[in-house]
Amino acid sequence: MNDPRETFDGAKLMLFLGDDLVILRRDDDPDIPWPGMLDLPGGGREGRETPEDCVLRETMEEIGLAIPREALQLAHLREEFDGSRFFFAAHLDADWVERIAFGNEGAGWMLMDPDSYTEHPEGIPHFREILRNYMAVLRRAASA
């Protein structure tokens, strides 16, 4: 059996700044997956980088934030026929929004309530489901 940390092809980050989630608008280019949809920071693996290195690099490239490695928590592992994808979560203070410097990938960024994303028709469907499950775990933990 393959080790997903060795065979993964990408990583995404559910980045919470305060209570809100950082959301990116994908370019409206028909040659990319999910054109024009609402996305999470992250992307494809480069070289032999780890899932953590991948998501930290992509987040820096896309929104200019150097997320502390210790803030990352593995939230979901999605294994598909063509590779695995890691989904991390990080919860930072709301004042981090002032540090965002949008890069040159995508059409823009926004903050969004996580429940709004899970119901938004332009959210990438499997990302909405992963976030919905993550939020359910958080709510169960908070009520325990």
Image: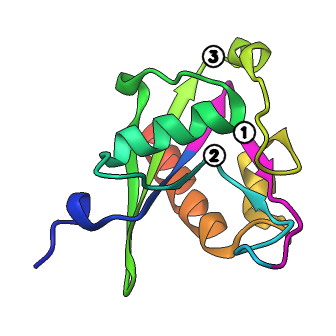
Q: Are marks 1 and 2 in contact (CB under 8 Å)?
A: yes
At horizontal 59% and vertical 57% (from top left) the residue drawn is 131
Which corner quadrant of the image does residue 61 belong to?
A: top right
SS of the residue under disc 1 = strand
Question: Disc 1 versus disc 2: distance between alpha carbons?
Answer: 8 Å
The location of residue 88, given as percent across then percent down, is 45, 46
Q: Quadrant of the N terminus?
A: bottom left
Q: Position of residue 127 (x, y in %)?
A: 61, 65
Q: Is residue 116 above or below residue 85?
A: above
- Tag 3 or tag 1, which sits nearer the N-term? 1
Residue pointed to by mark 2: 41
Apparent side of residue 109 relative to residue 2 in the rendered image (left or right):
right
Residue 94 seen in the current view: yes
Which amino acid, by three-letter code, is at mark 3? Asp
For residue 17: magenta? yes
Q: Could you say whether the residue bearing mark 3 is in a helix, strand or loop?
A: loop
The residues colored magenta run 14-30
Q: Is residue 76 above or below residue 138?
A: below
| Distance CA(mark 1)–CA(mark 3) | 12 Å
Indicate which disc residue 93 carries: 3
- Where is mark 1, residue-wise? 22
Labels 1 and 2: the sequence-earlier one: 1
Indicate which label's residue lies in the foreground, 2 or 3.
2
Rate crowding at label 1 as few (under 14), some (14 to 19) or many (20 or more) other CA atoms within 10 Å. many
Q: How many marks?
A: 3
* Outermost residue, left side: 1
Q: Quadrant of the C terminus?
A: top left
How far apart marks 2 and 3 lie (CA) works out to: 17 Å
